[in-house]
Amino acid sequence: MNDLRVPFIRDSLLNVHMKRQPGKPLAGLKILDVGCGGGLLTEPLARLGAVVLGIDPVEDSIGTARLHSSCDPDLRGRVRYRACTLEELSAEEEEEGGDGEQGAGLFDAIVASEVVEHLADRETFALCSSCMLKPGGSLFITTINKTNLSYALGIVVAEQLLRIVPRGTHDWEKFVSPVDLERLLESNGFSVQSVQGMLYNPASGAWSWTNSTAINYALHAVKERDDLRPEAAEDEEEHSRATSS
């Protein structure tokens, strides 16, 4: 999946930040990888120049990630791992940064790949993501649509027949459609920039982009800046009318 998601994240961030450094296109950016597991996505993003914090509630996964990254001196100083949840990290930031700028956030981007379909509370996830992002920061999600086809392929075929993933890994009731996910994010101050379908070929083991989002899809959303929100514009307009009168 990295063949798709790494360029997707890289190119989307370059479009937003318009900064390029040969060999390290993401230099100067801070990224939070939520549900990082063993660091399969964390490390490639750091090799592109970003400073990346990977978090996961599973201690063993964090141990594996730390061991693997320690073998690559190029990652030293650019990759950190913590065994915690996004909610715990957000609560810490709120406590420590209570006297700082409200809504300033810590990260230029948050990545949540194959995470949303396991969450019991997506509303809290969206809220915490917004709190941890700088205004104008990006949120990247790859997940599974909630369709009959995703149930057939993602659970029946992948778990029960081919056993690509362990049985019981997914709960179809937690899958989310692009429309519902976009509605959730927009209600928490995000503007969705793009949604693209992803397709896995079990014969070749390769991922490819597709026009259909019926199974897997990738989403890029941007946290709206306060000065660009409709309510902010309305406040400014009212202030201008009041001063002019």
Image: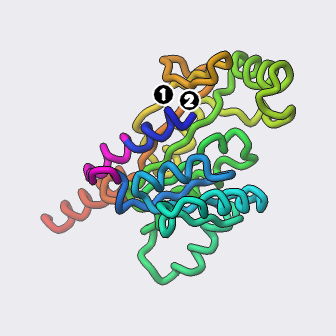
**Label placed on residue 217:** 2
Q: Residue shown at 73%/24% (left/top)? A: 154
Q: Disc 2 or 1, which lies upstream in sequence?
A: 1
Query: Dot 2 lies on which element?
Result: strand
- The vertical placement of 193 against 232, above or below, is above
Counting from the top left corner in percent of width and height, residue 76 is at 51, 67
For disc 1, the marked residue is 196
> Foreground: 100 or 110?
110
Q: Residue shown at 47%/56% (left/top)? A: 46
Counting from the top left corner in percent of width and height, residue 150 is at 70, 21
Circle 2 packing at 10 Å, graded few (<14), some (14-19), many (20+), is many
Image check: 40 left or right of 75?
Answer: right
Image quadrant where one finds the C terminus:
bottom left
Task: Name the amino acid, label 1.
Answer: Gln
Counting from the top left corner in percent of width and height, residue 82 is at 66, 66
Image check: 103 left or right of 95?
Answer: left
Q: Residue shown at 32%/46% (left/top)? A: 14
> Foreground: 76 or 178?
76
Asked whether 171 falls inside the magenta stretch, the response is no
> Foreground: 14 or 244?
14
- The vertical placement of 113 against 94, above or below, is above
Task: Name the amino acid, label 2.
Answer: Tyr
What residue range appears in magenta? 11-24
Counting from the top left corner in percent of width and height, residue 89 is at 63, 67
**Residue 131 visible here:** no
